[in-house]
Image (spheres, rainbow, N blue to C red):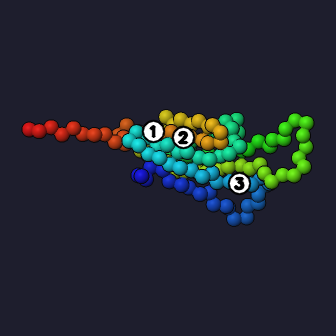
Amino acid sequence: MTNQLSKKEKPASPGTEQTNRRPLMTPDVDILENGDDILLVADIPGVDEKHLDVEVENRVLTIRGRTAEQEPANHRLVAGEYSPADFERVFTLSEELDQEKIEASVKNGVLRLRLPKAGQARARKIEVQSE
């Protein structure tokens, strides 16, 4: 795979204090490439499109998600092992990707981002002719 996408971890600033009591998770991501685009597949269980934010600014792609606190109607929690969580992952995009044409979809806790390559970055076959 080419260096069109790189992981960018967000370091904790010295002296900062966490104000959110929810755990912050880093979603697992698979990155696949073909000649025309890159497909980024992220696992964000419990996150739907209403609680998902995907942004691109200055070639930095940020994925943020939040699981909803779910308690069925007419029920109360007796024992719980699941904790609602926030998800965040940051990538730096290459100039070879067309940021204006990124497409996103989420289904069953899986986010799919299609990152198309810019026209000049796409692989193409050059036909060789005999003389």
Residue nearer the viewer, 43 or 86: 43
Is residue 118 shown left or right of residue 126?
right
Residue 116 seen: yes
Q: Earlier in the sequence, mark 3 or mark 2?
A: 3
- Residue at point 90% right, 49% down? 78
Amino acid type at image mark 1: Pro
Q: Please say if the residues under marks 3 and 1 sit with CB atoms less than 8 Å apart.
A: no
Residue at the extreme left = 131
- Disc 3 target residue: 24
Q: CA distance from mark 3 to mark 2?
A: 21 Å
Q: Residue 65: image x %, image y %?
A: 68, 44
Q: Earlier in the sequence, mark 3 or mark 1?
A: 3
- Disc 2 target residue: 113
- Residue at point 48% right, 50% down? 5
- Disc 1 target residue: 116
Q: Quadrant of the C terminus?
A: top left
Amino acid type at image mark 2: Leu
Residue at the extreme bottom = 14
The residue tagged with tag 2: helix, strand or loop?
A: strand
